[in-house]
Image (spheres, grey):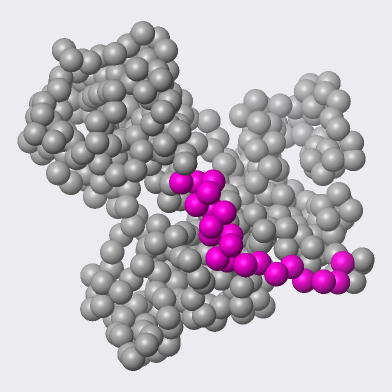
Amino acid sequence: MDYDVIFIGSGHATWHAAVALKQAGKNVAIMEEDTVAGTCTNYGCDAKILLDGPFELSEQLKQYQGKGVNEPVKIDWSQLMAYKHDVIDPLSVQLTGLFKQMGIDLMMGHASLTDGHTVTVEGKSYTADAIVLGTGQRPAKLPIEGAEYLHDSREFLDLETMPKRITFIGAGIISLEFAAMAAALGSDVHVVEYGPRALAAFNTQHVDQLVAKLTAAGVTFHFGEGLQRVVPVDDHFQAITDSGLTIDTDYVLGATGRVPNVENLGLEDVGIAFNRRGIEVDDHLRTSLPSVYASGDVIDKPIARLTPTATFESNCIAGQILGNPSPIDYPAIPAVVFTMPRLAQVGVSVAAAEADPDTYYIQDIPYGQRLAFQYKNELDADLKAVFDANNYLVGAEIIGNDAPDLINLLTLIINGRMSANDLGKQIFAFPSSSVGIIDLLQMSLHRD
């Protein structure tokens, strides 16, 4: 064999395993047809959170209006975008350099399987004991008239100037995160959603609270509307829905989901099972060919397709190849929406707890009011904590600017099945924001 392991794709779903296996003495190659390091690093999470930073700070300052802060913050999108390029663009080069330094072979071009041990790229074939598929997903395209005028998240995150009028199709995470920034810059923002509500997977009360805040910021929501066509008119576009609603706009972003990159990989030829949701794998992340694994967003799985999940799976595959016989065991996985304010959730949902009151109970903690100064006067911040019958924390749903860090803390408590006694053995920094939440939780948590 030419290699011990060949990886197709260079994002988080693969490169963590590649590095771990190389460090363990394996001969490793990575094949990539796009930008090294994948979507999240170059065109997704990293770019988004960098651009989001000033908007988060501005939002926090608004909470002190009339309390010593009276001047609004002015954000220059063009300068911010230049800063994004300064920081994000070198990341793929840096990872390429790491591969070279470690002795991991990197081959650019589209790769496909010839059999369970052979990969062809740019007309050359290479063999390996194991192959890992981590080709990710891409934005779904609506089959409508004028689909060629729709933009995607990758293009939005490269916009040199923010459009004066922008319309988002779909009311999921991508649309609402971007809509929050556009509205803060003064754009006329519309969100068109086929369903009855936004962010269907998140807490209804918190989502309603977020939608109300975005509406107050200037975002117009159109629920129960399906996009029928996009028509160019003079120097702008019209987004027209099934009901005849017509929105004059300068930019239309389609964010109606993502589809797995399974085409032209040779899956059908070598007998690897897949469906419209992705590549089918077992509990060891093996495909129907035992020598071929799959990881990250490209696999068919019921859990959230998130960067940390892809990294977790990548590390699991490295362990499998190095001899760990254990199946993958997913912990509770947090999810965050980086709007203003943030939404976050982990574990058993409030809806599931309400449907099974004999097993779970819910505690509502309006921590923004109870811990006002610690949470920068964000009075509407709220935590809904789900406990099991033994008073262990098993789920949490949060709305608030500090939700991303808080959900990580609560994830540790859930996955560690920590009791009030466990937390009581620790000394936490005071008067930090998180220590207040810990104190409030301890009153309800199981005691040994």
The residue positioned farthest toward the right in the image shown: 68
Q: In this orientation, which residue lies closer to the viewer: 120 or 371?
A: 120
Residue 254: in magenta span:
no
What residue appears at the point 23 percent right and 70 percent down from the top-left corner? Answer: 143
Residue in front for this viewpoint, 282 or 52: 52
> Which residue is at 29% across, 13% downward?
27
- Residue 242 seen: no
Using the image, determine if residue 319 lies above or below residue 262: above
Q: In which quarter of the image is residue 100?
A: top left
Front position in the image: 316 or 104 = 104
Quadrant of res 28? top left
Asked whether residue 77 is in view, the answer is: yes
In the image, what residue occupies the spot 70% across and 69% down?
74
Relative vertical location of residue 29 with respect to residue 311 in this rendering, above or below: above
State which quadrant residue 238 falls in: bottom left
Range of residues picked out in magenta:
69-89
Q: Taking 373 as reference, is 166 left or right? A: left
Taken as a whole, is the magenta stretch helix, strand or loop? helix
Which image quarter holds the N terminus?
top left
x then y, percent, for residue 171: 47, 67
Tell me the quadrant of the picture where the C terminus can be found.
top right
Q: Is residue 366 left or right of residue 294?
A: right
**Where is residue 247 shown, x and y percent of the image?**
42, 86
Residue in view at x 50 percent, y 70 percent: 161
